[in-house]
Amino acid sequence: MSGVFSPTRAKIKERTLRTDKWWLQPLITFSVLFSFVIYSTFRAFEGKNYFTEPLISPFYSPCLSEACVPGSTIGGFTPVSADILNFALSPALIILIFPLGFRMTCYYYRKAYYRAFWLSPPACAVAEPHEKYSGETKAPLILQNAHRWFFYAGLVFNVFLTYDAIISFRDEHGQWGHMSVGSLVLLVSSSLLWFYSLSCHTCRHTLGGRLKHFSKHPVRYKLWTWVSILNHKHQQFAWYSLAAVAFADIYVRQVATGAWHNIYFF
Amino acid sequence: MTLERHNYDVLVIGAGGAGLRAAVEAREAGLRVAIICKSLFGKAHTVMAEGGAAASMGNVNDKDNWMVHFRDTMRGGKFLNHYRMAELHAKEAPDRIWELEVWGALFDRTKEGKISQRNFGGHEYPRLAHVGDRTGLELIRTMQQRIVALQQQDGRDFGDMESHIKVFAELTITDILKENGKVSGAYGYWRETGAEVLFEAPAVIIATGGVGKTFKITSNSWEGTGDGHALALKAGANLVDMEFLQFHPTGMVWPPSVRGILVTESVRGEGGVLTNTNGERFMFNYIPEVFKKMYADNEEEADRWYTDQDNNRRPPELLPRDEVARAINSEVKAGRGTEHGGVFLDVSKRLSAEVIKKRLPSMWHQFYELAGVDITKEAMEVGPTCHYVMGGVEVEPDTAAAIGVPGLFAAGEVAGGMHGSNRLGGNSLTDLLVFGRRAGAGAAEYVKSSGKNPVSDSAIATAAAKIQAPFDREGGENSYSLHAELQEITHNLVGIIRTRTELEDAIVKIAEIRKRSANVAVSGGRKFNPGFHLAFDLDNMLLVAESTAKSAIKREESRGGHTRDDFPGMNNKWRQINHISSFDGTQVHVREQALPVLPKELFDLFDVHELEKYMTTEEIAKGGSN
Amino acid sequence: MARKLNLRIWRGDSDSGALQDVQVDVNEGEVVLDVIHRVQATQMGDLAVRWNCKAGKCGSCSMEINGKPRLACMTQVASYPEGETITVTPLRTFPVIKDLVTDVSFNYKKAMEIPAYAHPADLAPGEARMEQIDVERSQEFRKCIECFLCQNVCHVIRDHEENKKSFAGPRFFIRIAELDMHPLDILKNRKKTAQEEHGLGMCNITKCCTEVCPEHIRITDNAIIPMKERVVDVKYDPARWLGSKIRRREGI
């Protein structure tokens, strides 16, 4: 036997003597993340109901395929041939790897899913079920070190989604100066994505964390200080932005299918 | 079973600041060094030091220099310090701090990027190098990491990191061994297994710290049992001025989780009020004649002082430490104290919770976290707590060699003389470094000239028999209860305020416990057995208590950390006298010895009028030695 | 004032051991260590427990209380519901010696493996100049009291004995980070050795070390993750690697 049952350790038969509800947190994390995965997979393959003037689902933006529904592309920019999507695959699949990769390699989500999905460990001081453990030293987990590339890609996506939020301040006919519940939804979700990205550990490192002497780089030190404050709340931003993006997609879908009506304030 | 034996050039007993600094010095002189810690490496009481380390680097005020520091130290010690120790300390402290930086310490900085220095009581200029309120931790960690650095170097040079410095953690030394009148090594046991160990070493440096656990209420940890004091006495060395102990008037006495922890004076400064169990604010009854002009004699005026300090006299809670201590002591002895021997200190009635948390954040946090005591809502139970011992092994200042025992050295709190009758805050951390280094150098010098001094089999047999003895007794005394009895006696009779009759009483009672302690029996086996460990600590504490009581009864004056109710005030005659404790195998003897006279060049650093307060006219007329 | 507390204490040694129930008086405001001391003084004179300062500053009384790694001197009895049995056991990651005392020498061995601070040769004592903002990051890590609760809770070694040889643990990752961020340290390869020799890559940032730290050092966010990012700079980022070849950039 290994771990806490190794021969030299105190002979205690319980895997943990914790008396609190230590299983609750991983259970919640598992349920929420799992639901999101199921829903987003369904949506990624659905390939429709992602656009309704002037709203586009964040799952499908930027829409880069010739197969994209009219109006959903950025000025008709469609570098991806429709042939590639012949197997009834949706335009979402071209781009989803980037936001997905950003979240998969995120230092917060890693904690969340290592605990909730992989039970490594399920909670602090609760013995994990695995016989062997090598952490992030081998493939595939060594790829977690690519987080910064996904971070850069994530910034590009944030720009697109912010653009989507801005152009949602129009009516169904493309007239500017209007605002609907949908524009609010997109605005909130794109803003939270910015907070999520900017509070990221890689961002903190890049802006200033990697320096040895803050005093020689006053501006970067200031930026680092600000990002450090946001970084405290990275976990919250991770969840809020995830929820906001999911809701934005649900909202667009409901409006696109006609189930909901996008109410205009003005 | 064969005895575990080790052979080193230098054995350092104690792994606090002084011991580690000594070990580094001895190793750098090319010697092989063993370091003994009673607990784990890096847990020594040095970590508790909060304020800082005093060194006249002059980073904040460039008027500071060693002479100013020397003067402050002598004043603080009421001129009972060994002048040479105070001089060496003041001169060398800055180098000792700077060298820590070379080893990786990170002190708080000034705007110019130098080591920041803060003000502290008794120091004329901002002088304490610090890291927030955890300076002691920084010091011990830096020394610990310096040891590791040297070990890594040895690993590269000799292929074995522990070839020249080895740390023996959780090991207690029970005897210092001598052959032909000189130190030959030390004997002890592993706390973990109870197995015995012999160290052969021609030089032994004692750096074991303080004696606080001799008293009931103390800020010291369990390790402060005066081991080094007792080992030195038993080896034939002397202790100097053991009557001088630093007590703080307001330490927590209850609940036990915070017992002994200091309640800073600023709690009273911010409006904390002392009351007895009858609810009386008793300090008004204890204002001495000389202070009547400065301190309010009624509650209304005292309360007004907090908002208007120009037109009102100060509340009597802010009287000097010894007056506050005396008052608390009297109240408790008159039966108006709490069942735990304290009085109430309440800051919650005067200030709102927000203000308290803002002005006394660490006090609030500490008591709330450690004991669930919310000082914004309830009173604290406080009384005098034992904090530091000024007295200690009599040493030769330049080498830290213990007088009378060739091969024995002592540094840090266990050594006496440096602080005189009262230690200035911040001086102890630099004391550790300055004299730790000197002890290491002194020992190295000694070893190089004296050579080996093998331990005889008979010395081993005697030491081994002592360790086995408590296991062979049946139905004897319990070391826990004897310890508790001793603490009760010292606390009540040899504590912060002393009188002849009580001290006489104490001497008799300590002797009785000593007799009973010869019959301590231990239950359980040798393996990590705290009852067994305490049996040896108890023996040490009894010797310390006896030295303190016997020195205290002789000194018929009040000076620094020694307050006699029957002899209030300083007496210049007594300033010329050190009390030297020695041990004849059955009891401690205390004799008077002339204090070394201040040499002229140091004498001239002072204003004559200031010296008149401390010295007799004849001394002043002489103007120092030579 | 006093009430009875049901305490369950693990007693034993490396061969055998079991939880034993005792009833002990407890007063208001007491911490678990006080109660253990009372058991020791009144019922089990040879109960082994390590402690020193009893003020949360030395990090000696590390144990597991109701399964959670904690300092006994910082754990109030009142933080558990009245009537609840409190279970205390030794740390479960290190070999047990006796009762609540474990052999933590693993940590001291690891401490000896971390290359020491390297001071610039041309900077004499007293000449060092450092800005406060440049020392603050390392100062946070120097708050560490070496209670080794982070080492104990870390599943990398808690649950996998075989990883002990290749993994230094959170306490020493903050030591490495402290030195790598030290404004004057001149040793260049700390990032590389952190990954290749001290097992930084084994950490899967599940943050239990941060959760148990009694000094509230943000071990994961401020030390481990920044070190992982620094490792990426020198090992896994071709752009940075190229940049560092072309011109020596600050911070690498």
Image (spheres, rainbow, N blue to C red):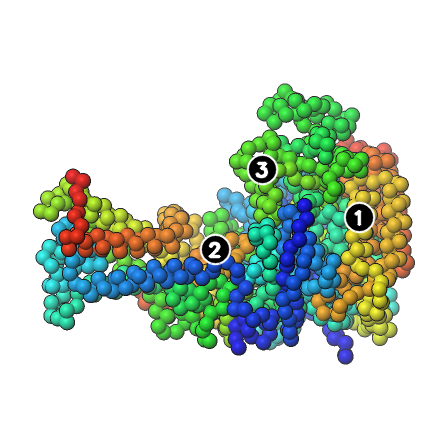
* Quarter in which the N terminus of chain B is drawn: bottom right
Question: Does residue A248 show up?
Answer: yes
Camera-side mark, 2 or 3: 3
Q: Which residue is mark 1?
A: B488
Same chain for labels 2 and 1? Say yes or no.
no
B88 and A37: which is toward the camera: A37
Residue type indicated by callout 1: Glu
Kindly state the secondary structure of the residue where label 1 is placed: helix
**Residue B417: x and y, percent?**
78, 48
For the residues labelled 3 and 1, the Cα–Cα distance comes to 31 Å
Chain under numbered label 1? B
- Amino acid at the residue labelled 3: Thr
Residue A27 as seen in the image, left or right of residue B615: left
* Marks 3 & 1 on one chain: yes
Residue drawn at x 88%, y 40% as measured from the top left: B500
Quarter residue B197 falls in = bottom right
Q: Tell us which disc is closer to us: 2 or 1.
A: 1
Write down the chain letter for disc 3: B
Position of B255 compared to B519: left or right?
left
Q: Earlier in the sequence, mark 3 or mark 1?
A: 3
Q: Which residue in the structure is indicated by mark 2?
A: C218
What's the residue type where badge 2 is placed?
A: Arg
Label 2 to label 3: alpha-carbon separation = 29 Å
- Decide if residue B60 is in sight here: no
Disc 2, SS: loop
- Asked whether disc 2 touches disc 1, contact meaning CB atoms under 8 Å apart, the reply is no
Image quadrant in which you'd find residue B286: top right
Nearer the observer, B557 or A35: A35
**Left or right: where B113 falls relative to A83:** right
Which is more toward the observer, B106 or C232? C232
Residue that appears at 39% across and 74% down = A138
Q: Which mark is residue B376?
A: 3
